[in-house]
Every structure is written in C-alpha cells, then in structure tokens.
Image (cartoon, helix red, strand yellow):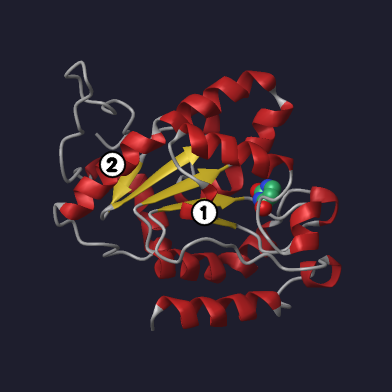
Amino acid sequence: MSREPWAEALYARIRGCTSCALAQTRALAVPGEGPLDAEVMLIGEAPGANEDKQGRPFVGQAGQFLDELLAAAGLARAEVYVCNVLKCRPPANRDPLPGEIDACRDYLDEQIDMVDPLVIVTLGRFSMAKFFPAQTISRVHGRAREIAGCFYVPMYHPAAALHQQSLRAIILEDFRELGALLERARRTRGAGTPARVVGPTEAARLVPALSAVKGASPPPANSAGQPAIQGRLFNE
Ligand code: URA
C-alpha cells in the first residue's frame, strides 16, 4: 500500500479507537504527524493537555523545546515524524499503564513500518523501554544502536529537561550529535544494508542481543580525523 492511504486509514483507526479506557477521557486522539517518508522519527510518551485539545503531538511547552533541540541537530520539525507511545492522554498526565501501552502497541509498530525511518529517537523512558527494555536512561541517553539499517537512539524527554535544569545541557548535547548520526545512517542504508529486514516488534526483541550485531560501515571521521561518533554507539 502506498503511504498516504495507509496513513489515512491508520489515523482514522486511531481516532476512533476504543481499545482502552483512555478513549472515555480523551478529547482527541493524537495519531502523530510529519512527512510519511521522514528520515527521523521521534517517539514521545503520551499526549498532554494541549495535544489532547488539538489532536497533534508536542504542541505545548515541551514541543517548543523539542523544536529548539531539533534546530541544534540541524533539523526542522516539518522534516521529522513525531508520534507517541500512547495515542490518548492519560488523565492528569499520569504515567502510561502497561495495558494502555499494549493497547497502542500495534499502532506504533505500524507507524514505524509505514515511515521506515533511518533514525528513531525515543524521548523519555516509556518509548526507550520499547527498544531498550533493560536500560536506564541516565546510562544510555544519546547512544545509538543499529539494527538492519535503522539507528535507535534514546534521549531524555524534553519535558524532563524543562523541569530539571541540569538535564538541559545534556539533552542539547545529545541532539547536537543527531546530525552526525543521521549522516551515518544515510551512508549505512546507501551502502546497501537492507531497510527493515526485521519489523519493530522483532527489533525490540533483538535489542538485548545487539552486541552480536555488526555495524555496516565504520563511523565517519570528524575534522580532527577522529571517528565522529565512535564510542557513542554501544553496539561497537
Ligand atoms: N509529551 C509527550 O510525550 N508527547 C506529546 O505529544 C507531548 C508531550
């Protein structure tokens, strides 16, 4: 199926979803948005109050900060795809429940298959847990792993950095490296690593075994002749 009708059908299913109790308290479901062929996909946690009102992801304060972070990476919001683990707002912005994450899982997996990005950025611990189940964000933030031509990089959630000043510089630095990672991902795919030979569910299952997965190409050198992101990739 081509991407436009796929997205239309998927978003309609999400907007009408009644798979969990959040359907009763949401104003609008928030499927996600961005170019359907985006190279970078960002996955947040769940819609907040503003997103619930507008039906769009990251439109509040965290969204404004996300735009700044993207600018630090040399990216504009209009060129990335943004969505969330949960498509509906949990009351009072509480943490997502396991049953709610399960109810939304297929939607997110389908979005990943549809967009087929080169880089997936997880924002916060709930989206990190999908791909890095046994990790803590303080240990792995900013470090990418590659599976079958797609790079997965966990980042702190922008809202966490808004509330905790010490995280601000850290998340900014992590985003600054995203440009180099995207370059590397382009080279890796360009070098013929097959795109998405595994689906996202399987990729999540494979992540703990990634130490055995070999990167497709050496990291690009920076101006000092050092590999630009070596040591930041923890599958090497
Ligand atoms: N926080 C999220 O995780 N997602 C949004 O869409 C907004 C805030």
Q: Is residue 204 left or right of residue 67?
A: left
Q: Can residue 219 be seen in this view?
A: yes
Residue wearing tag 2: 183
- Determine the image quadrant of residue 180: top left
Which residue lies at the image location 65% right of the left edge and 60% below the top edge? 86
Quick one: quadrant of the N terminus? Answer: bottom left
Which residue lies at the image location 18% right of the left edge and 53% below the top edge? 190
Along the line of sight, the residue nearer the viewer: 38 or 120: 38
Which residue sits furthest top?
224
Q: Do the residues labelled 2 and 1 touch (CB within 8 Å)?
A: no
Q: Residue 136 carries which label?
A: none
Quick one: quadrant of the C terminus? Answer: top left
Along the line of sight, the residue nearer the viewer: 49 or 210: 49
Which residue lies at the image location 58% right of the left edge and 35% below the top edge? 68
Mark 2 or mark 1: name the one nearer the start of the chain: 1
| Secondary structure category for the residue under label 2 | helix
Q: Which mark is residue 78?
A: 1
Q: Where is residue 191 in the image (x, y as percent from the top left)?
A: 14, 52
The kind of residue on which mark 1 rests is Ala
Q: Is residue 169 above or below residue 81?
A: above
Along the line of sight, the residue nearer the viewer: 97 or 91: 91
The kind of residue on which mark 2 rests is Glu
Q: Can residue 157 be seen in this view?
A: no
Q: Position of residue 179 (x, y in %)?
A: 37, 37
Measured Cα–Cα span from mark 2 to mark 1: 18 Å
